[in-house]
Amino acid sequence: MASPDQDVYMTLLTSDRYLPGALVVAHSLRDAGTTKKLAILVTTDTVSADAMAQLQTQFDFIIPVERFSSDNHTNLALMNRPDLHSTFTKINLWRQVQFRKIVYVDADMVALRAPDELFGLPDPFSAAPDIGWPDIFNTGLMVLTPNMGDYYALKAMADRGISFDGADQGLLNMHFKNTFNRLSFTYNVTPSAHYQYLPAFRHFQSSISMAHFIGQEKPWMEGRDAHMGSTPYDQMVGTWWAVYDRHYKESVGEPQGDPGHQTEDRQQSVDSSSQGASTIVHYHTKGEFQPIAPIVSQAYQPEQTDSEIFQPTAAAEQSLHETTDIPRDVEVAYVPPVQTNLETHHDPPSYYEPPKEPEVQYSAWDASRAPPPSDSKPEASNFPATHYDMSSDLTPFQAPERYPDPPKDMWYEVPKTPTYQKPAPIFPWEKDAAKPTRVFPEDNVATETFSSSDPTPNSVPSAEDARGSTPVTPTTPTIQLTTADPWQTYTRSNAWDEIPEIERYIGNLQKSRKGNIQLLQGYGSGIAQVSSPGGRRHSMKLTDFPTELERPSLPVTPAPIRRPSFWGEERDEEGELPAAEGVPSQEDWDPAAELEKLARRQSVVLANKLGMDGAPAREIPLRPLPYGSEGVTSPTYVAQVPPSSGAKDSASGSAPGSDSTPRTTIEEPSYHGPGAMWEKDETFPVKETPAGATEEEKDVLET
Ligand SMILES: O=c1ccn([C@@H]2O[C@H](COP(=O)(O)OP(=O)(O)O[C@H]3O[C@H](CO)[C@@H](O)[C@H](O)[C@H]3O)[C@@H](O)[C@H]2O)c(=O)[nH]1
Ligand SMILES: [Mn+2]
């Protein structure tokens, strides 16, 4: 058995014709003292059993392999080598993974010395240059490390007929194109009868390891007398014959020696074990087969092979006589085996001229003369194609230890100089504006406490007042919080209210419109000189709202009268909501009287003001009362006559001239509609909410 670390020399036999060559290779290596084992690839369908038996005597391993054929007959015909159709079989070398290293040797080589050092090469593939085209390597000698990767690649190419010469050399040179380790020519010297570089041969002669007889003619096919000269080629051929004769030279009558015994003299007999068996070797070696022999029909009895094959059969005998010139009366000692199972030709002995067989035509199709052959392949069928298979790897995916770093400079860089620039100040107060400060509710609480004892409790103290106020008593914080009204404590002043420029500006505006202002002064809607009841300071603040006391109180709608429910019952007391504070009860509420009161108040205030200002009293135009209120009379109410005398003409329903006569009908209120708040070109009212009734007005109302 071969072990994975074993090294072997290996050759190939695809037909019996090369049997002498394969045996000589083995012998030459052994004779040269190799320490390596010998193996041979054999295509069993085209190699006879007796040839196999011969191989068994010399090779340590006989390996049957599948035969790969090339259909590229055109290129083989170009080389005039149609016999090389099966050399694709060589790719089986790469699947012999039971060996560590293989030194492949063609069957037409002979070893002058054993190149065992080639097994020490680290390169996976080495070969020597071809003499016909030194850029490529010759496939007669190759040092290779078998592996299935190369095998499948080569097989894929072979299946598609990819080879520039139609044989293995073209295929292998395409696959190992630029990756082969180039060996010295001395490992594969291919002498030629036509071209010899004599000085080089002489110079390197002593270092030649192997000679290779390339081409159609092989030493055993030409006979021992073909090259008897002294040229390098002749010398190489002589070397081959020396090995052959050492082992296969037929020497009749020589004593049989030890099976392993080999003689140095090429004229002496071959070793006894191969004497009988070597007949098939002789048969395939020109000039070596001895057909005429004594009647020894059973002369050859092979020990290790099927004897049936070697029995001279009547049919075989007949066949031999028919195809040769051998007279019928001559006994044939050996009849070649009838290889009916083989497609390939049966090699005839070299001593006779075989009848002319119809020559195999591999001529190329001439497109200019004929249509393509009907059995030709489709166009571009030899284009290289790559086939991918699904992965059968069952190992789970392992993430790599680290992934490549992310690309840099991918962040947004904030501009160094900010694009925002403060706009240039436009207004004077923008230049020296006070830094804004925060005011917290606590500050205002303190203000509230302070202002509770103040005579003007409703005036809104400014922030300055609050800061300058007396310190808050820390013992009554809770009281302060509960009494504080956030709406009252919240400062309603603006920063610009205190700016003198603005006050001056407003003042100037008012001066130019004095007349109008004076007219309104007394009514509380003026800007300046507003006198508040509590001594309220004159302010020009735009946001100075009137206090609660300054605002007129609005008439209050009484609570509704409760009616019995559908069931005629009064609802439970407990379900009632508490009465609103300040709302008079229904019984105390006289709508007519209240309406009268309201009307009177309006008239009195209006008359008062107008009279005070000294302006001529305007007649109040009459207006109809709202629907439903016409003709309502009150038995108790007597309308007050305005102080001005103009009422005499304007009052409706009152007797003329009777000023002192109390009226019995409610005076119709005048109504102008909303009207414009202010006219065009008029100064806008700074006080949006009119000031409440003054003390004087209140006095009038209450009387
Ligand atoms: O009928 C045959 C033909 C070939 N072979 C084997 O195939 C090899 C190659 O054939 P060969 O006659 O030696 O070819 P070469 O004349 O050497 O031709 C060259 O071209 C061939 C085809 O490319 C290559 O295989 C050779 O290595 C290369 O030297 C032989 O050595 C044998 O091992 C047989 O066994 N029987
Ligand atoms: Mn060869």
Image (spheres, rainbow, N blue to C red):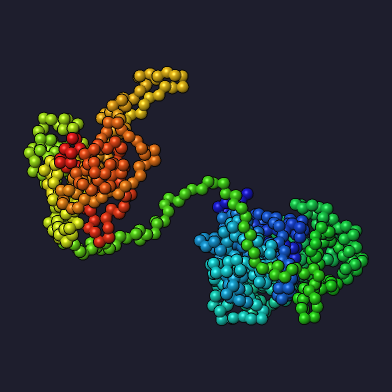
Furthest-right residue in view?
329
Residue 553 visible in this rendered orientation of the protein: no
Residue 680 occupies quadrant: bottom left
Q: Picture coordinates of residue 63 (x, y %)?
A: 68, 55
Residue 678 occupies quadrant: bottom left
Is 441 situated left or right of 557 in this image? left
Q: Picture coordinates of residue 544 (x, y %)?
A: 19, 47
Q: Picture coordinates of residue 471 (x, y %)?
A: 8, 37
Determine the residue positioned at 90% across, 63% down: 318
Q: Picture coordinates of residue 282 (x, y %)?
A: 76, 65
Is 286 situated left or right of 400 in this image? right
Determine the residue positioned at 14% across, 38% down: 457
Tally of numbered tags = 0
* Front residue of this view, candidates 129 and 353: 129
* Front residue of this view, candidates 189 and 97: 97
Determine the residue positioned at 84% across, 64% down: 293
Residue 118 visible in this rendered orientation of the protein: yes
Determine the residue positioned at 51% across, 61% down: 122
* Front residue of this view, candidates 10 and 645: 645
Q: Quadrant of the C terminus?
A: top left
Q: 699 above or below 516?
A: above
* Front residue of this view, candidates 224 and 219: 219
Is 160 situated left or right of 325 in this image? left
Is 150 situated left or right of 659 in this image? right
